[in-house]
Image: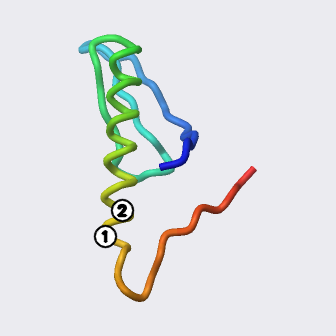
């Protein structure tokens, strides 16, 4: 999978940090530290994109990369 950048929102809470990816509805994670939360959201984004591609794939469709500035 090619490298991609996603904007995330990091929020400090009493339990540590929560983090979400507004561009991927429902994609969120958390961690005790900022570094842990960011590592966890990276993994969540990878799984989200993989699952979305698997759901979208059938014999009549294909996944194509499109560059966006």
Circle number at residue 36: none
- Image quadrant assignment for residue 16: top left
Disc 2 element: helix
**1 left or right, relative to 54:** right
Q: In this view, does 7 lie to the left or right of 67?
A: left
Residue in the picture at 37% in, 73% down: 56
Dot 1 crowding, Cα within 10 Å, few <14, some 14–19, many 20+? few
**Residue at the bottom extreme?**
60
Q: Residue at x 40, y 33 (%)?
A: 42
> Residue 40, position in %: x, y?
32, 28
Displayed quadrant of residue 35:
top left
C-alpha span from label 2 to label 1: 5 Å
Q: In this view, does 26 lie above or below 20?
A: below
Q: Which residue is drawn at 41% across and 37% down?
A: 20
* Mark 1 lies on residue: 55
**Number of on-image labels:** 2
Q: In this view, does 7 lie to the left or right of 30?
A: right
Residue 6 appears at what percent x and percent y? 54, 41
18 or 57: nearer the viewer: 57
Q: Are marks 2 and 1 in contact (CB under 8 Å)?
A: yes
Label 2, residues with CA under 10 Å away: few <14, some 14-19, many ≥20: few
Q: In this view, does 61 lie above or below 34?
A: below
Residue farthest along the left direction in this orientation: 15
Q: 43 or 16, which is in the foreground?
A: 43
Q: Is mark 1 on a helix, strand or loop?
A: helix
Seen in the picture, residue 31 relative to 62 is either above or below; the reply is: above
Residue 52, horizontal then vertical, whole percent? 36, 62
The residue tagged 2 is: 52
The colour style of the image is: rainbow
Residue 4, position as x, y percentages in the image:
56, 43
Taking the spot 75% from the left edge, 50% from the top edge, the residue there is 69
């Amino acid at each position: 999978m090619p490298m991609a950048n996603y904007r995330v929102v990091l929020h400090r809470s009493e339990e540590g940090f929560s983090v979400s990816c507004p561009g991927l509805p429902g994609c969120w994670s958390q961690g005790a530290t900022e570094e842990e939360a960011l590592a966890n959201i990276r993994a969540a984004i990878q799984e989200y994109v993989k699952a979305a591609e698997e759901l979208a794939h059938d014999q009549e469709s294909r996944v194509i990369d499109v560059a966006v500035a």
